[in-house]
Structures are given as C-alpha cells and as structure tokens.
Amino acid sequence: MSSIATGFRARRVDARERSKGQRRIAGGVVWIVVVAALLAGVVAVNVAVLQLNLSLDGVNRHRAQLKADIALQQAKLASAKRTAGITQGLVQADPATTVTVDLPH
C-alpha cells in the first residue's frame, strides 16, 4: 500500500473514533435532558397535589365550622323548645287552695 492510502485510512479511523465519542457525548446529553424533564414533571405534579391538599384543607375547615354552627343552632333550638314547654304548662295557682308555710329561722 502506498503511504497516501495509509494516511487516508488513519484519518478515516480517527474520524470514526471522533464521531463515536461525539455520539456518546450527545447521547449522554440527551439522557440528561430526558431525566431533567421527567424530574420537572414530577415536581410539577407534586406542586399541583400540594395546592389541591391546601384547598381541600380549607374546605374541610369550612365544613367543620358549618357543622359546629349547626350544632350550636340545634342546641339553642332545643333549649328554646324546653323553655316554651315549661312556660306553656304553667297555670295560675288558686289562692284558696294554697298554703303558706313559715319555717323558723
């Protein structure tokens, strides 16, 4: 073989090795970008879930407050019903049938 052909082959092999290295680096960069995109997606989902949990917590607090208000109103209503029942059952005592008892001190 001539020295020109040998030089050409050497350059060809060197170019192949260089392109393999560049492909390897490019492949690594692609993997880094893919993993970064996946991690960004996971973070975005976590943030969305946290926001939903916060809004749900607010709704639950409001619900508990409404239940407490209902319980308070029910207690007031029951008390009013008892008081109304007591006052409705009262009649004026007949002075002729009542006796006053004086107790010694």
Image (tube, grey):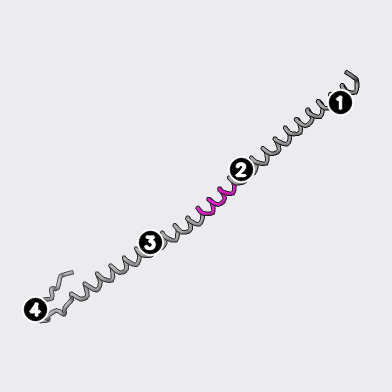
How far is the residue under mark 4 from the one under mark 1?
138 Å
How far is the residue under mark 1 from the one under mark 3?
87 Å
Which one is nearer the viewer's eye here, 28 or 50?
Answer: 28
Q: Which residue is mark 1?
A: 8
Q: Position of residue 96 (x, y in %)?
A: 9, 81
Q: Residues within 10 Å of mark 1 (few under 14, many from 20)?
A: few
Q: Which residue is mark 4?
A: 97
How far is the residue under mark 3 from the one under mark 4?
51 Å
Which one is nearer the viewer's eye here, 76 or 53?
Answer: 53
How far is the residue under mark 4 from the one under mark 2?
93 Å
* Residue lying at 62% horizontally and 46% vertically, measured from the top left: 40
For residue 6, above or below residue 59: above
SS label for mark 1:
helix
Q: Which residue is mark 3?
A: 67
Look at the image and give the residue range highlighted in magenta: 43-52
Type of amino acid at the residue the image marks with label 1: Phe
Q: Quadrant of the C terminus?
A: bottom left
Q: Residues within 10 Å of mark 2 (few under 14, many from 20)?
A: few
SS label for mark 2:
helix
